[in-house]
Amino acid sequence: MFIYADGEPAIAIDAGYAGAALFEELKRLPIAQESVTHLFLTHADVDHTGGLDAFPHAQIYLSRDEEQMIDGTTARFLGFYHCPRLKRAYSLLSDGDVITVGTIRVQAIATPGHTPGVMSFLVNDHVLFTGDTLALGSGQVYTFYRLFNKDTAMQRESIRELASLSGINLLCTAHTGCTRDYARAMQCWRGDTP
């Protein structure tokens, strides 16, 4: 999970796992967890939604196309598991929607593949949070681990769409780190299929 602040209020991208470790890590930050007023979920897997209780007053946002993952319509992992239902109210986003939180501008970008409704979030036109839409290795972007994807071919198309963005100075993934060299990371996605 990530917390982004430009004064107050602050936003969170995903909520990580539940548990005491999350609360301990939040105490180390120079930002009070109460200042997080908006929480943007890239998708509904429990490692991204489990820590929602750490932000009890934050407004939650989720892709309209991801709601099927939390309402019991679509199963995860070969049909044997369903993502947990959210126990709080949430607002649905569509591709291209923009939410402004203080001085923070968050643009929703549909990037399906890992799940049907994964969203990436472009913050203030320069910082891109991709959740599990892609992975980084040796400074290069590649698809997230196929075993966990609902549709890797669709994920490739989503990555190609992200590769067309310009002005990104920080790319943040959920599991494989960050890079400040977006152009290099996306280089092989701007041409033929990697």
Image (cartoon, rainbow, N blue to C red):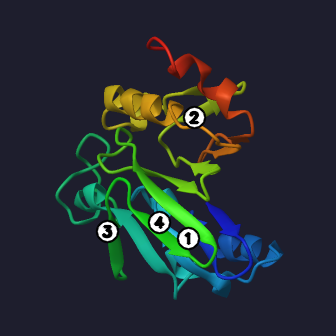
Residue 4, image quadrant:
bottom right
* Marks 2, 4: nearer the viewer: 2
**Label 1 – label 3 distance at C-alpha:** 23 Å
Residue that mark 1 sits on: 18
Numbered badge on residue 49: 4
Residue 151, image quadrant:
top left
* Marks 3, 2: nearer the viewer: 3
> In terms of sequence position, does the residue under pointer 1 or pointer 3 come before the other?
1
Q: In which quarter of the image is the N terminus?
A: bottom right
Amino acid type for the residue under numbered disc 4: Thr
Amino acid type for the residue under numbered disc 1: Ala
> In terms of sequence position, does the residue under pointer 2 or pointer 1 come before the other?
1
Graded by Cα atoms within 10 Å as few (under 14), some (14 to 19) or many (20 or more), the crowding at tag 2 reads many
Residue that mark 2 sits on: 135
Q: Relative to 187, is 45 above or below? A: below
* Marks 1, 3: nearer the viewer: 3
Counting from the top left corner in percent of width and height, residue 13 is at 56, 63
* Marks 2, 1: nearer the viewer: 2
Are discs 3 and 2 less than 8 Å apart at CB?
A: no
Which element carries disc 2, helix, strand or loop? strand
> In terms of sequence position, does the residue under pointer 1 or pointer 4 come before the other?
1
Which element carries disc 3, helix, strand or loop? strand
Are discs 2 and 4 less than 8 Å apart at CB?
A: no
Residue extending furthest toward the top: 192
